[in-house]
Each structure stands twice: as C-alpha cells, then as structure tokens.
Image (cartoon, coloured by chain):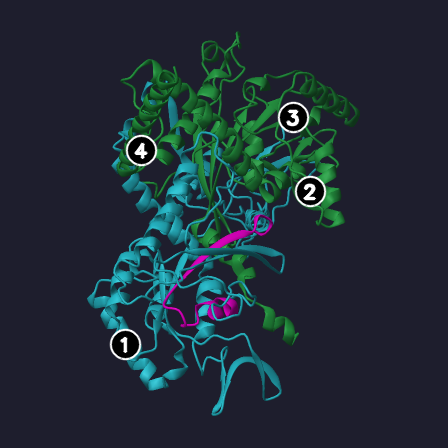
Chain colours: A green, B cyan
Amino acid sequence: TNTQEKQYVGFATLPNQVHRKSVKKGFDFTLMVAGESGMGKSTLVNSLFLTDLYKDRKLLNAEERINQTVEIIKHTVDIEEKGVKLKLTIVDTPGFGDAVNNNECWKPITDYIDQQFEQYFRDESGLNRKNIQDNRVHCCLYFIPPFGHGCMKALHEKVNIIPLIAKADCLTPNEIKKLKDRIREEIDKFGIKVYQFPECDSDEDEEFKQLDKELKECTPFAVIGSNTVVEARGQRVRGRLYPWGIVEVENQSHCDFVKLRNMLIRSHMHDLKDVTCDVHYENYRAQCIQEMTSKLTQDNRMESPIPILSTPDVETEKLIKMKDEELKRMQEMLNKMQQQMHDKDQ
Amino acid sequence: QQFDLIVSLSKEFSGPSFHHRHSTKPAAVCGTSASCLHRHTHAPTPNSVMAKEEKGMEEREMKKEMELEMELKAEVKVELCPTVPGLQMSFIRGTDLFGYVGIEAVLDQMRRKTIKAGLEFNIMVVGQSGLGKSTLVNTLFKSKVSRKSCTPNYEEKISKTVKLHSVSHVIEEKGVKMKLTVIDTPGFGDQINNDNCWEPIVKHVNEQYEKYLREELHINRKRRIPDSRVHCCIYFLPATGHRLRPIDVEFMKRLGKIVSIVPVIAKADTLTIEERQEFKEQIRQDLAANGIRVYPQKEYDEDPEERILNDRIRESIPFAVVGTDKEHQVNGNKVLGRKTKWGIIEVENVAHCEFANLRDLLIRSHLQDLKDVTHDIHYETYRVRRLNESNMNYSELGLSTWPLENKCESDSHL
C-alpha cells in the first residue's frame, strides 16, 4: 500500500546485500571422517557430495596395516551449484582403529584439529588478516560399527561430532532401533558431547518444527552409501544390489542417508561452522592463552601469545604520579600538624 | 548430460549390452578437479561380444578424446554381478548426473541467521548547526531518531568545544531489526576560531576502534563483539555554490583516512540544477586536488562489476539533498516536501533533489559494504598501527614452543 511504501526505509534489503557478497565469495567447509577401515566412509562421502574422491585408491592388505599409524589425508574439491561455490575439504583418517593396539589411535586426530586451531590463531593475531584461510574442522562424522562401540570422548570437546551407524544394511529395523537406543544411552552415560541441533525458532512453521523433531529423534543416523546406480521400481537410483533385494540409499525407509545429507548440507552447515568458531575454537584459544600466560610469568624470555596493547597515555600516568606525590606531601603535612597540636595539648 | 542407463536383468547371458544417449546438461556440475573428467563408452552394436583387448583399445582411444571433449560425461563400466547369474550392473564414477547436492541452501541458512541476529549501524553527522543534519537523519530513517536543535526544550547550549552526542534506536522492518546509532557533533564549525575542532571527532572514532580491539584480544571474548565503530560519516557542505572551504578540506583530509566519509550538499534547494552541477564539479576537483578519499574509495573496489557501479556513484557525489519531515499533497498523493510560495520541493523526487540517491546508497545498496569497509580496512589499519606501537613480536608467538610436532600430513588436491 501507499502508506506502507512511504514508511519503508529499505534496510530490510540487508540480507540480500549479504547474500550477494557471499555468493561472490563462496563458502568453505571442512569435514572429517573417522572410523575403522571398511566402514563405508569413502562411499558415504562420495554419495553425500556426488563426487568420486577415491578413484585411484589402493587398499592395503593386512600385513601392510599391522604397523600402520593413523594418517591424516586431505582431499579438496570445488563444487559449484547454481552459482554458489563450495570449497569442500574432506579430512580422512585411514588407519584409525585398524591396528592391533588402538589405545592412542585418536591422538593424531586431536593433534590435527589442534594444529588447525593453532594456525588460525596465529593468522588471526597477525598483522595481515586479509585472506585468512579457515582450515578448522567443522564437523566430524564418526562411524560406529554396527556391532561395536567407539571412542568419541577424546574428540567431543574439540569438534562437532555426528555419530553414524555405518553399513546399516546389515541390520533389521528392530536391530537398528535397539542399537540407536543403546548408543544414545552410552552417550548420556559417559557424558559424550555430540553435536546438538539448535532449537527451532518459535516463529518457524509447523512443518519445519516437525521435521526438526524427527531429525533429533533419529540420531544417531544409520547410513548406507553407494557408488553404484541400480534400477529399482522403474527408476534409476543409487543403491546396493543384493540377491534378496535392492537397498536404496535415498529411500528414507531404508536408511537415514537423506536425513544426514539434508542436515549436513542443506540446513545445518552454517550452524556447524558457527559452533566450531564460537565454541570449540574459542575454548582452544582461551586455554592456549592461559597456558602461555602462566608460562610467561615463569619465564620472562617468552613472548606474549596475544598482542598486548601499550598502557594508555604516558601523560596521564605522569599526572597520576604527580597527584599521588602531592597527596603524599599533604598527608605528611597533616600528620605533622596533628602531631604539633597533640604536643601542644600535652 | 542426462544418461539413460538401463540395467537389464536378463535370464540368459547374451553378452554385455547397454544403451545410452546424450541429452541436456546435468544439474550438478562438478568443479575443476581433473578427476571429474570422464570418459564415455560408445554403445557397441548389439549381439557383439566385446573382447577385453577391444575394450582396452577403446579406452585408450577415449583417453585421447578426453582432451578434446569439454562436456562432462560419466564413465560407465559394466560388469557381471558375481552372485546373480545373468545380472549386469553398471558402475558410475564421477559426477552423478541426476543428483543435486543442495549447496545453495547454505545461503538460506545464512539469511535466516542474519535476520535473526539483526544489525548495528552507526552513522555520524558532521556540519555546522542549521545545515539540517537532524532533519536529514530523521528523513533517512523515517523516524524521529535525532532531535533537532531548534526544537523547544532543547537544553544543550552551544558549547565551546565539539561535544559528541550519541543516540541509539532500534528500528524494525520486514522482520529485520536494526540498532541505529546516530552520533551528532554539535559545535563543529560554529565558533569563530575553529582550529582543531575535528580533534574530538578523530578521538571518538579511534576510541571506538580501540574498544573493539581490546574486546577482540580479550581471553574470554563475546560471541558477537558489540560494534560501536563509526560506519559512515556524513559531512554536510553548505550550499555556497563556490568551492570547498578550508575547514572542509582540513576535516575531510584527516577523517578520510580513518572513516568512510560521505559528503553531501545540504539545503540544496538554494541551487538551480546548473549551479548544482557546477558546484559538484568544483567540489570533486577540490577533493582530488587535496588527495581526499571519500566513500566509495576507488582502491577498495573488489571486482570490475563493483568498479563500474561505484564509478557511477563517484561521478555523482556529493549528493545534493533536502530534508524534511512534513508531508504535503501533490497531485493527489501525499509526499514529503518543503512548501514554498513558488512550489513544493519533493524530497523523494529525483528530479528535485538527490535525497533518494543518498538513501539508496547508504541503506539499500551499500549498507553492508559500509560496514565491511569499516571492519576490513579502517579497523585493520588502526589495529596494525596499534600493534606496531606496542612493539610486540607476535609473528613469533609463544606458540612456537607448543609441544605439537608437525604430524605427517599429505595433501591430495584433486
């Protein structure tokens, strides 16, 4: 209406302005996958991002793997869709959980995460902050084998963990339900902090709220991945072909792949990045500064971890000093006078 | 390209056969990685059994084709299912042709967050009293965010020094909340001797940068650091029609280095269109002659598209504005305007004055950019200067003694 137009200032266009800048800049996202070999991690990642990152991979045999330590391997892919660019980095952890003694298998992973935090901290504290690269790990997909447990606790305060039940096609729906319940119990019991979906806004529509509720009740997601296309029900779908039937990756009654993909990419990617920046990274930074500062008081030769600003105005300090001395003098005079009066009385 | 792949379950093994045809471009386009270049196999003639060597030869041929072909096609490999006799399965490698990742939804997520978080915008107005600063700000934001000094009960006397005066309001529009802070500078240029009257302003701008910097360096810093930095400084030039005055030059020279200045010609209803054009041209020359950089600064244009847009703006500044909060009837419509005996000056009519251009620049198109320039350029300049002053060698932070060895990390950049 005319009167509405009159009152319109126009700053509601701000989200559009921000939108335009973001499209130009593009996004980046770092995803870590952790789990024993053969859990279907690579296949799942391929299915999620519709690429083939592992084309020329050579699988090691058991002998070669006996003494293998956990490696950290990064793959980077640029994906563009409808003009939006995403630089996706997948951090793979081959060897995790594969050795005979797996007590310290999480250490290279936590070291890697810390290293990225450290690098970002340095960059952020430096002089030229124009093109800082954000290599921090935004999310870790943790693959729990369908028959076992895991060791999420080492990672839970460093990165957003999303536990997944891998190779869910070897479980019946009942077994899946039982396993999910058990895992949720263990998570509660051991106080493992997995990624929490943020609360729905009160002004979101009912459909969104319902979807959000279903999502939360469905964790941990039971997933299946596939690199192959098969024909099912007259359509071509991603799936796995067995003698007893076809498992469709994108069929919600078969597995939670669609929920995971929607959550990871379409609805919660931004929040995952925010939680990484605002919680995990800030914790690291605060801890780092405290440790360094305590070391600093012990060892004068060490530099301060963060830039310390010089104290204000030398002038003001001089002034304060002068006033202090004046006060002191006056106090002394007062004391003298009091003494004199006291003597006089006496 | 849409491939139609038909996997056929045939009871008798009659040799691999598959059909495909090319059609339109795929929805998901995989990026620049070499691994996304694929080969495609030609459909063999039916009833022919492809020998292994033939397949190998064909593959080599196709590799050559790869360099010539620019379109993405999927590599398709057909194999026999080891368990089910007569069943052929096809494996697709590379881009899935009928899938859609859904990355653009991230933009929606961002938009929702931006709207939820709201924004802060701090605008400073500088100019002698009586130039219509408060009126203009009120007109810009369509609300009484600034109190005019000519109103009754306005208690501040004209002080001997410039005393800055901040007022904040929260205004909401279409679900987006903005905390607008207007910083007024009464007393600027009002004295007979105006030496150094810009100093309190320079001090204020730097103080906001300092506040932000300290918060940023704090150990337990807030998620969203409250932003009181001046995003934009509107400098009011009286419509003399001649050229920049010494006070204008001095002020803009100094402030132009630390904040984004938007000069405007105030009370422009005393200039005819020709006079206005001449005045603007003269001002632009004076600005260039004195090395004064006003917003949008040429050096900060990020890409050619932005340069073209900003060049157009640079050719029309300073905007000649008229402000008012009164409405009148013109041709049956209510318009914001100033009524005189010789006509009504319509503030939002671009034929009359350039208020609408100013509003569009500040709010509708460059609001975010003003904030970005303040944060990425002015603030960073201040920060670098402060850190250098403090003389800390932070490029070798104490972190170099951090007990992490650099683990073996192999990068595979596809």
Real-space Cα distance between discs 1 and 4?
55 Å
Q: Are dots 3 and 2 in contact, CB under 8 Å? A: no
Identity, as a three-letter code, of the amino acid under mark 3: Lys
The image shows a total of numbered marks equal to: 4
Identity, as a three-letter code, of the amino acid under mark 2: Cys
Q: Residue at x 56, y 68 (%)?
A: B142
Q: Residue at x 42, y 42 (%)?
A: B212
Real-space Cα distance between discs 3 and 1?
72 Å
Is label 1 in a helix, a strand or a loop?
helix
Whether B124 is drawn above or below B391: the answer is: below
Query: Which residue was labeled with disc 3?
Result: A167
Is label 3 in a helix, a strand or a loop?
loop
Relative image position of residue B229 (x, y in whole percent): 42, 50
Real-space Cα distance between discs 2 and 1?
55 Å
Corner quadrant of residue A297 = top left
Is label 4 in a helix, a strand or a loop?
helix
Q: Which of marks 4 and 3 precedes in the sequence?
A: 3
Q: Are marks 2 and 4 on the same chain?
A: yes
Query: Which residue was labeled with disc 2?
Result: A200
**Region rendered in magenta:** B115-140
Query: Which residue was labeled with disc 4?
Result: A323
Seen from the viewer's position, the closer of residues A254 and A310 is A310
Identity, as a three-letter code, of the amino acid under mark 4: Lys
Q: Is residue B122 magenta?
A: yes
Provide the chain ID for the residue under circle 1. B
